[in-house]
Image (spheres, rainbow, N blue to C red):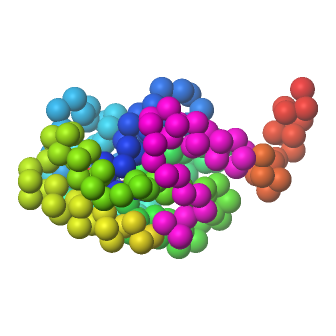
Amino acid sequence: MISAPSGAGKTTLCNALRQKPDFVWSVSCTTRAPRSGEIDGEDYHFLSKEDFARRLDAGEFLEHAEVHGNRYGTLKASVLENLRNGIDVLLDIDTAGAEKIRACGDSLIMEALADVFIVLPDLGELRRRLIRRGTESNEQVEMRLRNAEREMECWRDYRYTIISGSMEENIEKFRAVMRAERYLSRRMTAVELSRRAE
Ligand code: 5GP
């Protein structure tokens, strides 16, 4: 599970991780409009407000949160199915959603959970990155910066914190975390032990 204030390089990192087949990317639902280049069903399931509410009522979300004025939610069924099959799932989630995942009480998820927070060295850099990205209006940039300041406080809640550098550095740091996580004794099943010994 990865959280970061928007503009900290998380999407770039997640997109790079998605190029390799060792994670399944959890495609979230959102009521936000697609940005140019985003594909429905790959980047997000883009839903109307009504559709989102209907799925929420049907209990389809593991967690959901309102972020920057839009609703976002993680689909329960696909996360659990992948974990049951021993496949790692990558969640990109805001800090409120992350708290809900930590408190969800599902033993499979608790066992699998590794949470990583990405911080930027300073907010001035975040402002520059958001303006350079050019996907939000001035008002939205200001809202994302205010939220970033609040979200930055949460870094201690995460097992790992990565200080954002270049994309290559971030990928390397994240892969180091995943390597360590995969060697945790408690993650080893008998099947994995015999596979690794081969
Ligand atoms: P963006 O609109 O820039 O794609 O994402 C905005 C924020 O929503 C990011 O902080 C991202 O982590 C968060 N987000 C994306 N998907 C989910 C989700 O399924 N649940 C929650 N709680 N947050 C999400």
Frontmost residue, 16 versus 127: 127
Q: Is residue 169 left or right of residue 186?
A: left
Q: Position of residue 86 (x, y in %)?
A: 67, 42
Q: Residue at x 85, y 33 (%)?
A: 196
Q: Residue at x 26, y 32 (%)?
A: 39
Q: Is residue 74 left or right of residue 34?
A: right
Residue 56 visible somewhere in the drawing:
no
Residue 175 drawn above or below residue 150: above
Q: Residue furthest left?
A: 138
Q: Quadrant of ligand 1?
A: bottom left
Quarter of the image for residue 176 reads top right
- In this rendering, the count of numbered labels is 0
Frontmost residue, 159 versus 131: 131
Task: Confirm whether the magenta stretch covers residue 68.
Answer: no
Q: Position of residue 198 (x, y in %)?
A: 90, 26
From the image, give the main secondary structure of the stretch colored magenta: helix
Q: Position of residue 57 (x, y in %)?
A: 30, 66
Q: Residue at x 16, y 55 (%)?
A: 141
Q: Position of residue 131 (x, y in %)?
A: 17, 45
Task: Confirm whether the magenta stretch covers residue 176.
Answer: yes
Q: Residue at x 39, y 66 (%)?
A: 152
Residue 156 drawn above or below residue 35: below
Q: What residue range appears in magenta?
A: 155-182
Frontmost residue, 180 versus 33: 180
Residue 123 drawn above or below residue 136: below
Residue 35 visible somewhere in the drawing:
yes
